[in-house]
Image (cartoon, helix red, strand yellow):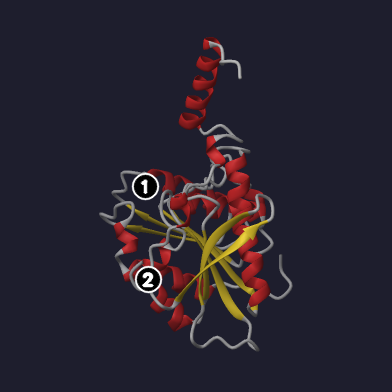
Amino acid sequence: MHPIPHFARVVFALVATLAFVTGLPGLASAQREARDNEYAVNDLRVQHRSYVMEETDESIPYAVFVPSTYDPSTPTPLIVSLHGAGRQFDWLMNYAGFLDQAEQHGYVVVTPLGYTRRGGYGYRGDSEQDRRAEQDVMNVFKLVTNEFNIDENRIYLWGHSMGGSGTYYIASRHPEIWAGLAAVAGGSMTAEYVDEEAIRHLPFLVIQGSDDQTVPASRARESVARMRALGMQHLYIEIPGGDHSLFVSRNPKVVGHLFSFFNLVAKTHGSK
């Protein structure tokens, strides 16, 4: 085997470095790691599952919660939940009171991974990483809706931080599915990855901490102002002193706002 010329080695190393730093599509950005399969929740009510993604022939994890009152003969509401960057796929099920309230109100809940723990959902543009993150969410959505008797007029999407961005993005790409949306400390109606015309008919809850140092409250306020200008049905809840994460993850009252909102909104029969 002939040795690689010094110049070629330098170029290869530079490309690899750039791929790591910038997340070039098709290179490091779309590679999965062992940690992507890790889970966080040990609650026996949570079913940890996986499926094989046809597009990549990889086993991708997801989690499902089914309320004890679930009856296969009765349509049941569904909440699709998108985690924040770097978190495990089931992370949101560990939020204070989340599963208890899903049980109380009779919701099936699913938490997709988004292909990796840093799925993206549009903010990188049309990247391989973002396409696979979206595909994973929709694959899991189809698995759950095929298995359970889901009320097609009561399917909801929400996310925290990166998952909030994902809520805007996924809803824009598949607006016909959702009865209501919620973004917590993430995403914006004014972002380039959002098709506002596609989702302006959807009820939207925005929850934000006033002292968030990761996603400033000003972004949420601008997003809500745009919703108001579009005449969207929306609700904005800003938590005084709230940070980026603990204000919702350790606060069952804030988690309760999600269920209160979703309990109020539903698609009218046959609506899109």
**Which residue is most to the front?**
1
**Which residue is most to the left?**
241
Residue 218: % across, % down:
39, 44
Left or right: 252 with respect to 192?
left
Residue 98: % across, % down:
39, 72
| Residue 164 vertical placement versus 253 (above, below) | above
Q: Quadrant of the C terminus?
A: bottom right
Give the secondary structure at mark 2: loop
| Residue 4 vertical placement versus 192 (above, below) | above
Q: Residues within 10 Å of mark 2 (few under 14, many from 20)?
A: few
Q: Quadrant of the N terminus?
A: top right
Image quarter of residue 251: bottom left
Give the secondary structure at mark 1: helix
Q: Residue at x 71, y 69 (%)?
A: 271
- The amino acid sitting under disc 1 is Ala
Q: Residue at x 53, y 36 (%)?
A: 28
Q: Say which residue label 2 marks.
A: 42
- The amino acid sitting under disc 2 is Asn
**Which residue is most to the right?**
270
| Residue 198 vertical placement versus 39 (above, below) | above
Query: Which residue is at the front of the view, 17 or 76?
Result: 17
Q: Residue at x 42, y 63 (%)?
A: 92
Sequence-wise, the earlier of marks 1 and 2 is: 2
| Residue 6 vertical placement versus 135 (above, below) | above
Left or right: 141 with respect to 220?
right
Residue 68: % across, % down:
48, 86
Residue 74: % across, % down:
63, 87
Mark 1 or 2: in front is 2
Q: Say which residue label 1 marks.
A: 217
As measured in the structure, the alpha-carbon distance from the residue carrying label 1 to the one carrying label 2 is: 33 Å
